[in-house]
Structure formats: structure tokens, C-alpha cells
Amino acid sequence: MPDEKTQPALRSLLSVPAGQQVRVVRIDGGRAMRSRLAAMGLVRGAEVEVVRNSGHGPFIVSVKGSRIILGKGMASRVYVE
Amino acid sequence: MAERKVITVAIAGNPNAGKTTIFNHLTGARQHVGNYPGVTVEKKEGLLRRGDIEIRVIDLPGTYSLTAYSVEELIARNVVLEEKPDVVVDVVDASNLERNLYLAVQFMELGVPLVLAFNMSDIARARGMEIDTQKLSRLLGCPIVSTVGHRGLGINALVEAIVKASRESMRPVQVRYGHEIETEIKKLQDAIMASGLVNLNKYPARWLAVKLLEGDSDVLAKVPGPIAAASQGARNRIENFFGDPPEVIIAEQRYGFISGACQQCVRRANVEARHNLSDRIDSIVTHRVLAIPIFLAFMYGVFYFTFALGDPLADLGGSFFALLAKSISNLWPPGVHSSLQSLIVDGIIAGVGNVLVFMPNILFLFLAIAVLEDSGYMARAAFIMDKVMHRIGLHGKSFIPLLLGFGCTIPAIMATRTLENRRDRLTTILVAPLMSCGARLPIYALIIPAFFPRNWQAPVLWSIYLIGIILAVVSAKLLRSTLFRGEAEPFVMELPPYRLPTLKSLLLHMWERSALYLRKAGTIILGLSVLLWAMSSYPEKPGLEQRYAAEVSRVKKECVVKQLDPEECQRKVAELEHSRQSEALEYSLAGRVGRALEPLVRPMGFDWRIATALVGATAAKEVFVAQMGIMYSIGESDEESEELRTRLRENYSALVGFCIMLFCLISAPCVATIAVTRQESGSWKWAVFQFTGLTLLAYVITTVVYQVGRALVAGG
């Protein structure tokens, strides 16, 4: 998005190492994906902890007290600070 | 004042919130499992009596939300809107409160009397959460009952709350979305009410307005055009104002409302004990190197359980039916052929046997699956296999059904119940018969030694299985990119904490699914088996019985006169009986169909005999072997019959032998598969599609192989 001022702190969830706690600031994607993520608790402002990010294998985050597996493609479209 | 006699209750909740346990505790064994009409989603209903009140309990599909993006969510909200239950119970995982309340606020919006069951309240307490349920209940405008599902605590209080809520018709509080959105909601709401075109008894106007703002495709299709157009304008205004589409703002507001309520009513000491153990198990079970071996070991366990433990019982059942058939046959004097006897023995008993013979496998399979599901491993398995399965356009969970297909297609198709997405599920069901099942093995076992030298036998068998797998992969990919096209399901899945399954719930799971197979598929399998029996028995050749009876008595007399060896004599009588069977089959409808099909099967190198046996093989694949035996007048043969092999060698080439195996592998699945596909997909359409699609595929591939093979042989 050219009109969006990309802040230096803004990065995708994929780049967050395991054990770190971050806050969701933006989610890109279609309506279906966003509503799916919202239903799992992933909305703007949600506190997220990355439980597992090993490059291989599952990408697991902890949101509002539950463990969620995210596809890599989805994780790359969730921006956090 | 007269007491209300029947109350309808719908049970809703997130997957993994313990909804099923609550449902089971409420209804006990008085359940009825079926499918929602036209869809593959399981529908469970049960009854409960409290004094003179009868409570009908409907189990809604487990969902996280009530959007129009998945069949499950659509069903959940449509049941509530259209069947108008007196009360909706939302089972909430109290230890995971905020996320679970997201669904609750959407039910509140539907304007139905709502009771919240705060399940797993023991875990919530252990995690240091203190919930002021009284205060929260006031804030949300609906009663809250604390329950501990697996121990059956709080169930009585829940029933009382249900009865009370059904009388008081208390309306839950509505979430407010802020000035801008509320203005648009009000405008749309007024327009809907003024139009008078929407059945407002069914659909609350405010709910419709909110859904229109969210761009809900299902609701957009329900409202008149001008209102749909007006809602697009409203959506644009909101997006311009907030810089985000309305559904995003609405979702955030809902969570905002929830988090506000929780801040007032929940105190937590921040201990996260529940996930610690789960995380530790996961670090092994989903380990980069160990995950696949562990998964395969579990799968081997499922296989072992289903077939190694199930098969001896199935064989026992088979022997029982054979014995039963024999003792009933013995009621008639020997040598007499009565149609009634044939109907009972070859039609009904064989048909019932066909149904029940799968029962032990199915029971063990569902028990194994229940353990994997209830413990929480299934979610991990789906994740581990997802990478591989995604390449062929399927979900990770499809792997288990396909693997089971090597044993038997029936449990494989039944196992697709673990797939939530309809497109994934239908694709898996349709390609499952390509995994070469155990019933096809007798055909290979008969043919391979007949035509191929010893050191070729294993590679040929292997190639048949491999062809099946490759075709399944290609067809799945093809189906996913044509008929079942659609955005690849985004991979988001909750990873529930591991739990120790309770015996009661395991047995209930096992039984409800097996009983469904018996009731639904059973009747169809029985019917089709009797039909196929009739086809290969009728019409009877006039005079055939008498001619052979005369022949038999002539041979017997000759034996006495010439003082032949009694064994020699018996052999001659048996030979006569075999050629009688052969002639009868040839004259029957199946034989005629076989004859009629001959020109059609010629390009594959088949003759009318093979065609007739193939018609019989639709009853059950292994019947092919027995039918070929009858065709060649060797009597009912099994796959070890050397005599039959010799006859095959005399009449066909190795190429034809291979083509028979190929055709049996790919073509028309057996009647049991057809019945189960019909039942599981919810319509005959898919069963017919599967049947014709696979048969056509088999025809084309076998013809190509035969023609190319023949050209090569001729050329070389």
C-alpha cells in the first residue's frame, strides 16, 4: 500500500521469533480470511505470543488463551508491532 | 396455567469447548444421528425428560463464528433462525473466555433466549481465573451456568436454567457499534421494516442490518434489491470513515465489548498451566524429524486396530453366515433348486452378511478415530500431513481416510467425517475408491500367478497399487481445480490442549457413527445385493432344471450299472451341476447384460464372460472370482483355484489379465461404496457421479493400455 506510512516497527508475524509477545496492527487479505482470523481471536489490537517459529514445521501462536496454527502464507499477512 | 410440554433447545459452541460432552450428558444414549439435509454435516438430536416437560435437544455444528463463509456456520444460524428453538445454549470454554464469547455475542444478536454454559470451569479456576458470573450475566443479559462437562457437574443447574429461560423469554443485551455504524444500522433496519418483504418473525431486522453491513452473501441474497444496494452505500460510507471495511470494525467492536465485560468480571492470576504440558508433548509430536515417524506409527496403530483386530471378527461373522446359509439350504432336499431357497440363501443372507461383515472393522475404526480426536492428536496429524496433502489440493486430514482405503473403502468414506470443509470432504470421498481395497486383492491373487512368472508377480501387484494412488492424486487435483474450485481453505486451526479421553465419550462416539452406518447404508446395501442376486438368477432357463435332473439321474444310474468308482461318480455329478450353473447364469439378466456389453468391452480385450463377472462384481469386488469360476463351469471358485487359472491362461493373454486387474481397480465401486457415498454426501448425485466417473475412467485407461499393449506385441 503506497499511501500507508510503513513504520520501522511494523513487521510480519513471520519474522517474530518464538517467545516474543506482539500486538496485531494490521491484517491484509480477503474478507473470508479476515473473518476467519477474527473468529479465532486475531483482530487488530490483539496480543499475540509466538509459541513456535522454527522455519520448518508448525507456526503456532497463542491468542486470547488458545493455541492457533497458522499457515505461513497467513502469518506473512499479519502485521505486528 | 397450563405447563408447556415440549421445549426445543439448540446446543452451540466452539469446537473443543466440550459441546459434545454436555450434549451427551443432557441426552444420554437417547440420541439420533443423521445428516443435515443435502449436506455432509452431522446432525445430532436427543430427548430429555424433566417432570412433565420434554426437552428436544439439537446439537449444532461446532463453530467459532456465524458468518456465511462455511456450511457449518450457515447451518448453525439457519437452525436458530428457521427452527426457532425456545432456548440456545452456548457452551463456552471458560478457561478461554474472550475468544469463546465472540460466538456468544453473535447469538445475542440473533435475539434468541440464550443460556451460557461456562464449561471447564474447573480448568479456568486452576488457571487462576475468577469469574464473577452473576455480574457478567447481568452485563450480557443472559443466564450463566458453570459446568464441568467430563464430570457431569452443573448439568442439573443447566437444565433448570433452560426451562426457566424458555418461560421468561429474556432478551440478551445487544452490542453497540458506535455512532457511525449504529446510524447506518438504524437506516437499514428502517428500510427493511418498511419494505415489508422480509419475514421479520424469522429474521430480526437489526441482525439483518448488521449482516448487510458485514457484506454477508447469504443475507444479501435474501433481501430485496434496493435494500442490498442501500447496504453497499452504507458499507462504502463506513469504509471511507474508518479506512477499513465494516466487518473488520464490527469484529473489533465485538471483541471490545467482550474485553470490557471481562475486565469488570474476571480476575486472573496469570498462570498458564494448561498449555505447559501440551506444549511439551507438541515439541515431540510435531518435531521436525520425529513428527512423521510418530504419525506413521499412530496410523499403523489405527490400521492394526481396524483390520488386524476387526478381521478375525469379520471372518467369524462370515463363517457364521456361511453356516447359516448351509443349514437353511439343508431344509430343502438335496438336488432340488427352489427359488425361495435361493432368495433366502444367495439373496438375503448374502446381503445381510455383506452389511454386517464390515461391522467389526467399522467399530474398531471409529474407536481408534475417537481416541485420536478426543485426545487432541487429530489436529496435530492434520497439521503434519498438510504440507504433503496441500500439493494435491487436499486438507491434511484427508490422509487418514485415504490410507484406510487400502483396507476397505467403506470405513475410508466414513472417516471423512473428520473433514470440516465440504469441498475437501467430497473430493476425498470421490477418490477414495481408487485406493485399492482388500476386496480387490483376491482378483489380483487369482490373476497374477495365472499370467506372470514368479519374479514378475510382486512388481505387477505393486504397479497396480501405485496406479491407483497416482490416479487418486491426479483426480483429486483435477476435482479441486474444476468442480470443487475455490479459494484454498486458509490454514488456520485451533490446537486444542491434549486431554485424556473418557471411556464413556469414546464408546458413544464409536457407537453413534457405527449405528448410522448400519441404519442408513445397511438398508441400501441389502437392497442392492438382493437386486444383483435377482439379476444373476432370473429369468430362469425353461426346462434347464428338468434336463439336468434327468442327466444327473442318468449318470447316477450309469454309475450303478457300470459299477464306477463313487468318487469318479461324484465328480461327474459336480461337473453337471457346474455346467448347469454356468448355463443358468448365461441365461440370466446378468448374463444377457454381459452379452450385450461384449461389443462395448471388446476394445479392452474382454469377452462376455468377463463382462458378466464384472456385473456381479459390483455387489462386492471379490465376487468377480467366484463368478468367473461359474462362467467356466468350475463351480464357485476362490482365488487359489489352479483349475480356474489354467482356464484363464487358455482363453486370455497376460495383457488381458493385466487389463482385468486395471479395470477392477479403477471401475465402478461396489454397492456398499455407492450406498455410503450416497449417505455421506447427502445425495444420489455424487454417488452416481462417482460410479459413472470411475467406470468411464477405467474404460478409457484400460482400452488405451490394451490397444497400445497389443500394438506393441504385434509390432515387437
Image: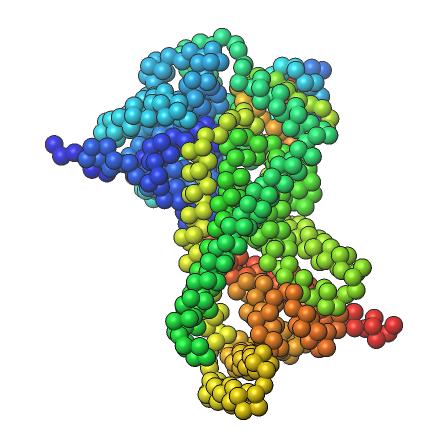
- The answer to whether residue B110 is above or below residue B34 is above
Picture quadrant where residue B603 is located: bottom right
Q: Is residue B47 left or right of residue B585?
A: left
Q: Position of residue A36 (x, y in %)?
A: 54, 32
Q: Residue furthest left?
A: B1
Report the number of discs: 0
Q: Residue furthest right?
A: B716
- The answer to whether residue B386 is above or below residue B121 is below
Q: Residue furthest front?
A: B563
Give the position of the C terminus of chain B as an image quadrant: bottom right
- The answer to whether residue B586 is above or below residue B26 is below
- The answer to whether residue B338 is above or below residue B71 is below
Instruction: Report the coloring of the rendering.
Output: rainbow
Q: Relative to the observer, which residue lies in front, B512 or B476?
A: B512
The residue that appears at 63% across and 73% down in the rendered structure is B610
Q: Is residue B447 left or right of residue B204?
A: right
Q: Position of residue B583 (x, y in %)?
A: 55, 82
The residue that appears at 36% across and 15% down in the rendered structure is B133
Q: Position of residue B560 (x, y in %)?
A: 53, 88
The residue that appears at 62% across and 29% down in the rendered structure is A70
Q: Relative to the observer, which residue lies in front, B610 or B638?
A: B638
